Image (cartoon, coloured by chain):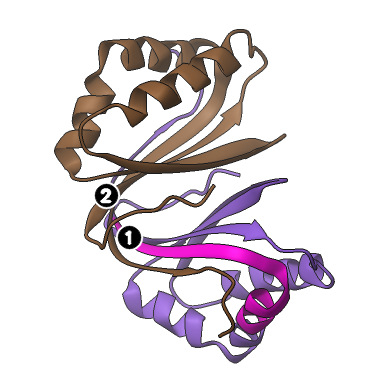
Chain colours: A purple, B brown
Amino acid sequence: MIATTPEPPYYAAIFTAQPGADDAGYVETAARMLILAESQPGFLGVESAHEAGGGITVSYWRDLESIAAWRRHVEHQAAQREGRARWYARYALRVARVERAHAFDGAVV
Amino acid sequence: MIATTPEPPYYAAIFTAQPGADDAGYVETAARMLILAESQPGFLGVESAHEAGGGITVSYWRDLESIAAWRRHVEHQAAQREGRARWYARYALRVARVERAHAFDGAVV
């Protein structure tokens, strides 16, 4: 669930989406996109959580070019079109440069 | 669910957490923190999604100083201590500068 990422700086693609009425094929495609993303150059990790009203997926990347290349990936582009046509009522994608990060792992503090 | 934010640049605080064994008081405090955050200077919006294994909350802020001031807020600091002592097994907080954003609102594309 919590991605292990290197020291900043690196980039985050914050994808927030509200589902539409038609989820046919969504689960399979989402799983495939996750596997595909993980094999892309510059991929660092991913975190996601979904509830009935919507979901958030944050993927982490080495640099902007890695994100741009993933956005242009032909199979990902087909999934993006399906997303707009069928699966998502609304979404937002924000690309951000991670400048600071800290983690808590349950140790006494 | 999807925050309405101004044109970039602005900042995102990406908080990813895995729940611990003790959730006493969590829901009430989380609701209170949301209300309190929304009243802080520089707050722009928030998005969150939670499932059994963990949750993601992304809050958006005008600048780094707004985030720092919210982190130092005395009531928020008490909640952070409770979070580490009781509610969270693990968490990560990343502060990132949003450089680009785009939204899809269901229009034909």
In reply to whether residue A82 is colored magenta, the answer given is yes
**Quarter in which the C terminus of chain B is drawn:** bottom right
Identify the residue position indicated by label 2 in the image.
Answer: B11
Taking the view exactly as shown, the residue that stands out farthest to the bottom is A74
Residue visible at 42% across and 21% down in the picture: B33
Q: Quadrant of residue A39?
A: bottom right
Identify the residue position indicated by label 1 in the image.
Answer: A96
* Image position of A38 (left or right of A42): right
State the residue in front, B4 or A55: B4
Q: Chain of mark 1?
A: A
Task: State if disc 1 and disc 2 touch (CB < 8 Å).
Answer: yes
Residue visible at 41% across and 23% down in the picture: B35
Residue visible at 37% across and 9% down in the picture: B78
Residue A105 vertical position relative to residue B50 in the rendered view, above or below: above
How many neighbours does mark 2 have within 10 angstroms: few (below 14), some (14-19), or many (20 or more)?
many
- Kind of residue at badge 1: Ala
Residue B20 vertical position relative to residue B96 in the rendered view, above or below: above
Q: Quadrant of residue A94?
A: bottom left
Residue A77 placement (x, y as % from top left):
59, 86
- Kind of residue at badge 2: Tyr
State the residue in front, A54 or A28: A54
Residue A63 placement (x, y as % from top left):
33, 71
Residue A96 placement (x, y as % from top left):
32, 60
* Image position of B30 (left or right of B39): right
In reply to whether residue B42 is colored magenta, the answer given is no
**Extent of the magenta region:** A79-97
Q: Chain of mark 2?
A: B
Numbered disc 2: secondary structure: strand
